[in-house]
């Protein structure tokens, strides 16, 4: 039985979602604010986190950033009425795996939870901690990129994307595959978010001319080392 940590400050909605998840076989930990939610996360190590973005004491984005300091793998789904591109990009940057806009159906939430749980079984690492990328050293667990003694901290989403590019280095990483893997769907909106992260990775890797991320038109990207 998978354990879901649900953090939602709107009590009526939180109780409805909790009861619906329990009826469908999930164990649910429920908190009404971010601080309480983080305490439950530390105490119980849930399989997936479902968190509202706008919460008292600790908002969903700050909660995700705190969780990612100790666990880079647990799936995080944001619930929000906000859908501005900048908000979505920030949520993914801080470690979110999916974004569900209110109002939403319980069935859709459950499908997304199950998809992330299935995907997470294959994500936990077998790769070494430090990965050589040209003259860079990429520390995936610590989300840092080092070059000539200088370290660049990375967001969770940046590190996840670079890891997948590294695993497919000198081969094409299909755009649709990475969108489904990291963003949950390959919509135009998520595609724009992916473009933002690719631009950032290119900037991080610009000091070694032997390392490039190139577009493969209509297909995806290739990390050339």
Image (cartoon, rainbow, N blue to C red):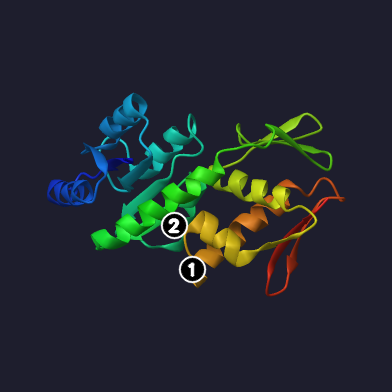
Give the x, y percent position of residue 169: 76, 52
Please give the residue where the numbered disc 1 appears in the rendered image.
189
Does residue 178 lie above or below 128 as drawn?
below
**Marks 2 and 1 close (CB-CB < 8 Å):** yes
* 16 or 91: nearer the viewer: 16
Q: Is residue 208 left or right of residue 29?
A: right
Question: What residue lies at 38% left-to-right and 39% top-to-bottom?
Answer: 47
* 68 or 152: nearer the viewer: 68
Which secondary structure, mark 1?
helix
Work out how far the residue at label 2 is from the one at label 1, CA to CA, in angstroms.
9 Å
Residue farthest left in this picture: 12
Does residue 14 lie above or below 178 as drawn?
above
Q: Is residue 107 left or right of residue 148?
A: left
Residue farthest top in this picture: 43
Q: Is residue 193 left or right of residue 9?
A: right
Give the x, y percent position of residue 162: 66, 48
Question: What residue lies at 71% left-to-right and 46% top-to-bottom?
Answer: 204
Residue 88 is labelled as 2
Quarter of the figure with residue 144: top right
Quarter of the figure with residue 126: top right
């Amino acid at each position: 039985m998978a354990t879901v940590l649900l953090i939602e400050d709107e009590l009526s909605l939180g109780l409805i979602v909790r009861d619906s998840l329990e009826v469908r076989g999930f164990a649910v930990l429920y908190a009404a604010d971010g601080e309480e939610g983080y305490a439950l996360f530390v105490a119980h190590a849930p399989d997936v986190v479902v968190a509202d973005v706008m919460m008292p004491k600790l908002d969903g984005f700050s909660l995700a950033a705190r969780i990612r300091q100790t666990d880079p793998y647990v799936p995080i789904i944001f619930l929000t009425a906000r859908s501005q591109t900048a908000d979505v990009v920030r949520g993914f940057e801080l470690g979110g795996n999916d974004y569900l806009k209110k109002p939403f159906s319980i069935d859709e939430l459950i499908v997304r939870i199950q998809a992330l749980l299935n995907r997470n079984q294959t994500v936990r690492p077998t790769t070494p901690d430090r990965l050589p990328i040209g003259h860079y050293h990429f520390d995936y667990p610590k989300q840092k990129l080092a070059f000539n003694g200088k370290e660049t901290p990375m967001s969770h989403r940046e590190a996840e994307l670079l890891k997948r590019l590294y695993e497919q280095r000198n081969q094409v990483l299909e755009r649709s595959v990475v969108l489904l893997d990291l963003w949950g769907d390959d919509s135009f909106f998520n595609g724009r978010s992916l473009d933002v992260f690719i631009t950032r990775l290119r900037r991080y890797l610009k000091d070694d001319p032997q390392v490039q991320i190139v577009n493969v038109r209509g297909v995806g990207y290739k990390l050339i080392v």
